[in-house]
Amino acid sequence: MSQMNLLQAINNALMTAMEKDDKVVCFGEDVGHFGGVFRATSHLQEKFGRARCFNTPLTEQGIIGFANGLASQGHKAIAEIQFGDYIFPAFDQIVNETAKFRYRSGNEFNVGGLTIRTPYGGGIRGGHYHSQSPEAYFAHTPGLKIVVPRNPHQAKGLLLASIRDDNPVIFFEPKRLYRAAVGDVPEEDYELPIGVAETVREGQDCTLLAWGAQMEVASKAAERAEKEGIDCEVIDLRSILPWDVDAVVASVKKTGRLVVTHEAPLTNGFGAEIAATVQEQAFLHLEAPVNRVCGLDVPYPLSHEAEYMPDETKVFEAIVATMNY
Amino acid sequence: MSKSIHKPGFVLGDALDIPTFKVLKQDGTLYKGAQEPEFDKEMALKLYDDLVFIRVLDERMVGAQRQGRIPFYLASLGEEAASVGSAGALKPQDMIFAQYREQGALRHRGFSVDQFMDQCFSNERDLGKGRQMPIHYGSKELNYNTISSPLGTQIPQAAGYAYGQKLDGLDACTICYFGEGAASEGDFHAGLNMAAVLKCPTIFLCRNNGYAISTPSAEQFSGDGVASRGIGYGIATLRVDGNDLLAVYAATAAARAYALEHNAPVLIEAMSYRLGAHSTSDDPTGYRSKDEEAQWAKKDPILRYKHWLTNKGWWSDEQEKTLYAEHRANILAAMKAAEKRPVPTIDHLITDVYDEPTPHLRQQLKQLKAHMRKYPDQYPKTSGRLDA
């Protein structure tokens, strides 16, 4: 075990993947010698050479187009999009190409070796274009997997699993936690399962569901609720697509209540999908409506960031309201 | 280092003066100074067979669409030499990323008449499992990446594929076909720049056929064609007469050698003309004259190549008649057989979304099947085979 922050855990996972398999290639804007603007790819070029870790021109659609081709050729392509907010020029390549490559060809070709890494989320005073959480756009696209880690240990295990999964994965990295989250990370190679949620705190009264950076908020809200005598069960979804319906439904059947929280705007956020599924599968167990604590339906703000964010107090209030419904 | 000037002076596009490479005149004789191709009689006849097959196939399939037997088709009339000639100069291990009008390249690789038909009729033997509209061919065995409708998306992909071939140290490159309209897409610029900067052995072959559906190339760009852009990206560039099979072949052979020797991309702009409609959903009488079409019909690439074969003493009228008759008969027979084959079973609705269907997808299929059992007449193509 070593103490690592989330960035170091990601760097360690990339290092491990590249050491174990010479088909693994990392690239993106500033990813080469510089090691990425956040330093997630530090020392990779030094260690594995320019052919396997390199800078690309500044073109997100080009990066993902290139990555699709490289993955279809049989390489494990790890493409970095510098900020999730800048993934949209590549939207066509991801939605129409990456996601459909296997299906449209009848499995003659696939891009299962592709992993797209991108930092997402707010809380860094980044305004509109360095703060967004775009996971729901991609969750509407069959053929993709979407993974979001909450801490360094999860980041390494889930990233290694994403790289080796035989399907394309978008790996959203909570950039607010890049240096803020520090924890024990095994030095050895390990993988955590994709599509499986993790219950991080057991409870009887109310299920609290989140992923990525929002897990920290959910956990703090659960602690606050505990002081009020409310026993929350906290679940980290870990994968948005596919998502662990069984784990969530089983928990809701036990507690009878669900609060879902994410940073992205409320309307059509992934919380909406969860709420719809839970009411369908656990309708008679629900003691209260599913409560969503999300960003407002506005572009991500700067000076009003604190007010916009679904913080610990908002989640706590939602828990209380759900209990008192 | 750029040299300095001390008064403002523009560089204009015509400074490039990009020539067009030609070998064969329309009467089948060679231009002065042009060279015979490097292939033998057997190859020469194979290429002719490919050209004629595609012409007959296109004619028959446009007819089949008119009769309502298939929903869509897209012919390559007038442009056959660009895809057949270029594919002829490649090795089987070279990957092809096509746009959608390169059935000639696929035929050259050995895609069978039954495979063409099974794809166009979306039946259970279609390699693509009946999931895409007609002409969206693909074959792993033949190194022909499956066609995707969105324009230009294959261009950066071809750069990435070739980069992988280079990393693996293979004697192989990638060719990427697209039209002059697709060259306006962002993916064109992204892909060519990526290939140039990352030194990918990719041959970008633009079929400049004059029209993007109804939009003439004069309304598509104002520079000197697509070729001028290759030079801007630092890519070795060649413009070729796309109706001249011998020139296209020689250009592609040279491009392949260059790409592998220098680990670098090449851009070929093949000048041609789309003699037919864009697709069966299009009607060119609304945007161009019969006279214009007639001028280009005189430059028919297949006729030109046939004249060359005849001049060589390798082809006769008798052989011509037999070849057309054979292809017509084979295509008709294959069409009848393909039409009768059922579509894939409903289980294939959920395969290949992922490497394995997720539990969620299995659940959705189960619900669908239960519904189909209740209303079998609503789903006649598959309801009889739910437990197959």
Image (cartoon, helix red, strand yellow):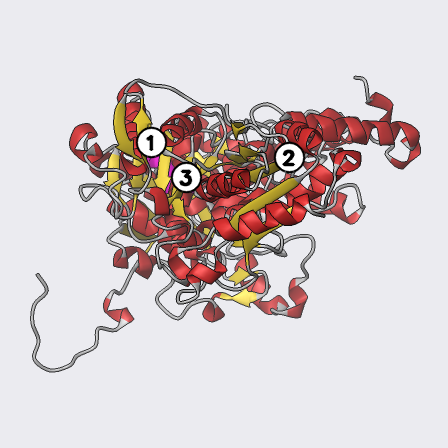
The relative height of residue A55 versus residue B123 in the rendered view (above or below) is below
Boundaries of the magenta span: B157-164
Q: Nearer the viewer, mark 1 or mark 3?
A: 3
Could you tell me which residue is drawn at 67 percent across and 59 percent down? Answer: B282
On the image, numbered disc 1 is attached to which residue?
A: B164
Q: Amino acid at mark 1?
A: Gly
Q: Amino acid at mark 3?
A: Ile
The relative height of residue B310 versus residue B209 in the rendered view (above or below) is above
On the image, numbered disc 3 is attached to which residue?
A: A116
Q: Earlier in the sequence, mark 3 or mark 2?
A: 3
The relative height of residue B76 versus residue B263 in the rendered view (above or below) is below
Q: Main secondary structure of the magenta part?
A: helix
- Point out residue B13 in the picture as x, y percentages from the top left corner: 28, 70
B132 part of magenta stretch? no
On the image, numbered disc 2 is attached to which residue?
A: A205
Subunit ID for the residue under disc 1: B
- Point out residue B51 in the picture as x, y percentages from the top left corner: 54, 39
Q: Amino acid at mark 2?
A: Asp
